[in-house]
Image: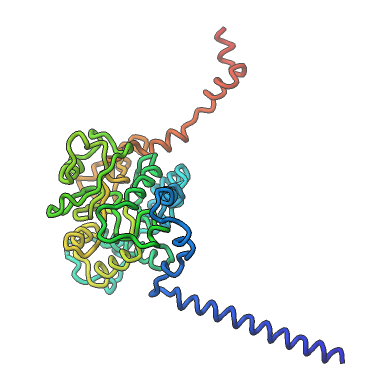
Amino acid sequence: MTARILSKAAAQFALGATGLLALILSMIIGLNIYYGPFMPIRSALIPTFVADSVDLKSATHQAALATHAHNTSLGFGEIVYISMPDRTDRQDAMNLLAYTFGLKLKFLPGVSGADISTKAIPDEVPKRLRLSELGCWRAHANAWRYLLDSNMDTLLVLEDDIDWNPNVKQTFETLSLQMQNSTVRLNEPSDYERANAPYGLDWDILYLGSCKHGGNPDFKNLVQVWDDPDVPDVNHLTKTTIEALKSFGLANVEIGKKRVLAPAYRTECNTAYAITRQGAQRLLFTMSYIGLHGAVDEDMTRLFREGRLKGYTITPPVFSQFRVGGAKDTDNKLPGDPRLGDSINGKGNLRGWNYDIKGSARQSMADTLEVNVWDDYKRVRPETFVGAKESR
C-alpha cells in the first residue's frame, strides 16, 4: 500500500516536473523566436518604464547617459582590437594600455591573405590588391560579423598600433553630449536612442581615428563644432588635418581649440572606428556579398562618397597611429619596401610618436610605471642609505 502511494506520488512529481520543464522550454523557444537575429531586439528589450518615468530630453538624463563614456568600453558595447597573431609585442602593449586606463579590450586575430580561400575572395577584387590588404579586409569583416553575432548595439574597432589622449574618457563624455544634441543628423532620435545610446544610432560608422579627413565639398556647412580642451595645439596637427578643419569653416584662431563632427566623406586608415548593427550589415553586404574594390579603408571612402554608407568623422581624431620609425610600424608593406627603412625597432617604444592628438596614452603609461626603488628608499628611509653616512 505504502509502495503504491509512493509510486503514485513519484509519478505526479515527474508529471509536474515535466510540465514545468515544458513551460520553461516553451518560454525559451518563444524568446529565441522573438529575439532572433532578424527581429528588432533593441526595441523589444527597452524597459518600458524608462520612457514613461524619465524626461529623455532633459539635461540631467543626457549628462547621466554621457557618463557611460567612463566605463570599460567607453560607452560602446565592447572594444575589440585587431592584431596579427604573431605580433605579441603589440598585444602586450594593448594589454598594458587597457589596464592602465581602465578599459577592456578583446583581441581579434588578424588574417593572412594567403590563408583566404580563393572561393571566399569577394568579386571585383582588383589585381593590384596585395595579400596583406586582403587579409586586413577579412580581419575587419570578422569584426563586423562579431557585432552581428552579439546582442550589442555598437562595437568600437581598433587596430593594434594605436595611441590616444590620456584624458580619453572625458573626451568621449563631451562627444556623447554633442551627439545627443546633434545638429547634423537627418532625423530625431528614437526614445530607445535617447534612453540607451550615448552616441546615438543614426550612423553606420563613426570614424574616431583616421589618417586623412575631409567633408563633402557640396555640404561644407553641415558641421557641428564645439570647444574641446583636449584638442592638440596647432603645432601638433598634421597639414592634412589643418586643411580639413579649414574646409569645415574653422578660422585659424579656432584650430587647436575646437573639434568638428561632420558626415563622413573622405577617410583613410581604419585606426579606430565604431559601427552599429546596421553598419555591420551594410559593410558585409557592400564589401563582401557584392564585392571589394580596393583596400578596406579605400573602399569605405568610395562608399561614403557614393552615399551608400552613413557615417560621421571626428576632426581632429580621438585616436592616432603610434610610430617608432622602423619595420615594426606595419604588417602591410613588403620586405624591402624603402618606406620601412633599415631598422626593425626604429627609435623604440619609449621614443615613439603620434599625431593629431594631445598627449600620449603610451607615454603616460610609461610615466606611471617608471620607478626607482633605491631613490624611493633614500627619500623615505634616508637613515638606511650607507652612502649618506660615508659622505659625512
Count of number-bearing discs? 0
Q: Quadrant of the C terminus?
A: top right
Quarter residue 245 falls in: top left
Q: How is the image coloured?
A: rainbow
Residue toward you, 295 or 270: 270
Q: Nearer the viewer, residue 53 or 19?
A: 53
Report if residue 86 is visible in the image: no
Q: Position of residue 284 (x, y in %)?
A: 29, 68
Residue 78, position as x, y percentages in the image: 42, 56
Asked whether 355 or 342 is in front, the reply is 355
Residue 93 appears in the rendering: yes
Residue 259, percent across and down?
A: 27, 43
- Asked where in the image residue 148 lies, by quadrant, the reply is bottom left
Q: Residue at x 17, y 65 (%)?
A: 126
Whether 270 is drawn above or below 43: the answer is: above
Q: Quadrant of residue 121?
A: bottom left
Image quarter in which the N terminus is found = bottom right
Residue lying furthest top in this view? 392
Rendered location of residue 196, percent (x, y): 42, 58
143 vs 203, nearest the viewer? 203
What residue do we see at 37% from left, 35% from top?
350
| Residue in view at x 22 percent, y 55 percent | 264
Q: Residue furthest left?
A: 218
Above or below for 8 versus 91: below
Left or right: 245 as drawn, with respect to 157: left
Answer with left or right where residue 348 lies relative to residue 129. right
